[in-house]
Image: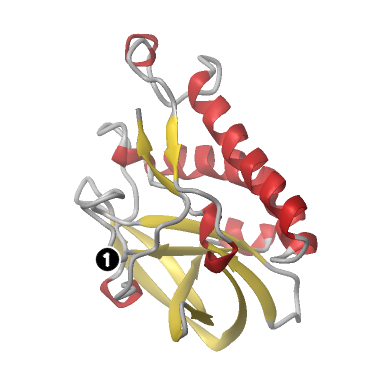
């Protein structure tokens, strides 16, 4: 179940990776259009029976995903510190099992006048695709967003320490919507003590 859930999210989120690498947080109007296009693509994938994680019966009551308003405030220029020796860790899944990830990086950034760090994790396939998996929790969880936290798939270029960490692109795990999927739980150290009012917030 885990693999299916993770790969499904990759298919939807990776459509924005090239734009995220080149656009960054600049050019506000174009940036907003690109974020909205990413969100619409994800929403369309949920609504399309051919790609949706929902069954046909479940789709009858699903009216679409909800997203917070796009705010450049939540698009941060960040620095990646790559760990010289990646640590293999077992991350608990929502079904009680565990999946092994490599803890490969620490991402430092400023947001809302404060400095934070989040740990980045990878599977071998993620390393090959140059994707850093960043699950996180924040003070909005259980209020305006999924109680278990959300994810960011962060694209990077080899040997580049500067990246764009955009919370407008964060998404909820599939297990937030469909209990038969098993998804990684957010490690305790990836909690942000602020409200991230951005990105995917739920569904209608």
Q: Secondary structure at mark 1?
A: loop
**Number of labelled discs?**
1
Vertical side of 137 occupied by 45: above or below: above
**Where residue 105 sits in the image (x, y, percent)?**
53, 79
Return the residue nearer the eye: 29 or 67: 29
Q: Is residue 157 visible?
A: yes
Tell me if I can see residue 107 in this picture.
no
Q: Residue at x 35, y 73 (%)?
A: 190
Seen in the picture, residue 192 relative to 150 is either above or below; the reply is below
Q: Is residue 177 left or right of residue 114?
A: left
Query: Dividing the image into 4 quarters, which one contains the C terminus?
Result: top left
Q: Quadrant of the N terminus?
A: top left
Q: Position of residue 189 (x, y in %)?
A: 31, 77
Task: Name above or below for residue 105 compared with residue 43.
Answer: below
Write down the residue under mark 1: 139
Tell me if mark 1 has few (under 14), some (14-19) or many (20+) residues whose alpha carbon lies within 10 angstroms of its own. some
* Residue beneath the point at 27% across and 31% down: 180
């Amino acid at each position: 179940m885990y693999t299916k859930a993770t790969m499904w999210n990759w298919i939807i989120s990776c459509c924005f990776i090239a734009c995220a690498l080149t656009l960054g947080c600049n050019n506000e109007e174009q940036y907003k259009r690109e974020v909205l296009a990413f969100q619409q693509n994800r929403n369309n994938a949920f609504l399309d029976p051919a790609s949706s994680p929902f069954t046909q019966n479940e789709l009858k009551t699903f009216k679409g995903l909800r997203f917070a308003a796009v705010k450049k405030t939540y698009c941060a220029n960040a620095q990646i510190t790559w760990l010289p020796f990646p640590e293999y860790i077992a991350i608990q899944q929502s079904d009680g099992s565990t999946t092994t990830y490599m803890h490969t990086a620490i991402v430092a950034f400023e947001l809302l006048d404060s400095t934070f760090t989040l740990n980045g994790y990878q599977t071998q396939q993620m390393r090959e695709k140059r994707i850093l998996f960043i699950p996180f929790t924040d003070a909005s969880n259980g209020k305006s967003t999924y109680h278990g936290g959300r994810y960011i798939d962060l694209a990077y270029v080899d040997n580049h320490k500067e990246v764009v960490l955009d919370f407008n692109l964060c998404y909820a795990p599939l297990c937030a919507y469909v209990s038969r999927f098993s998804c990684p739980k957010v490690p305790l150290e990836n909690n942000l003590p602020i409200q991230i009012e951005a990105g995917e917030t739920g569904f209608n």
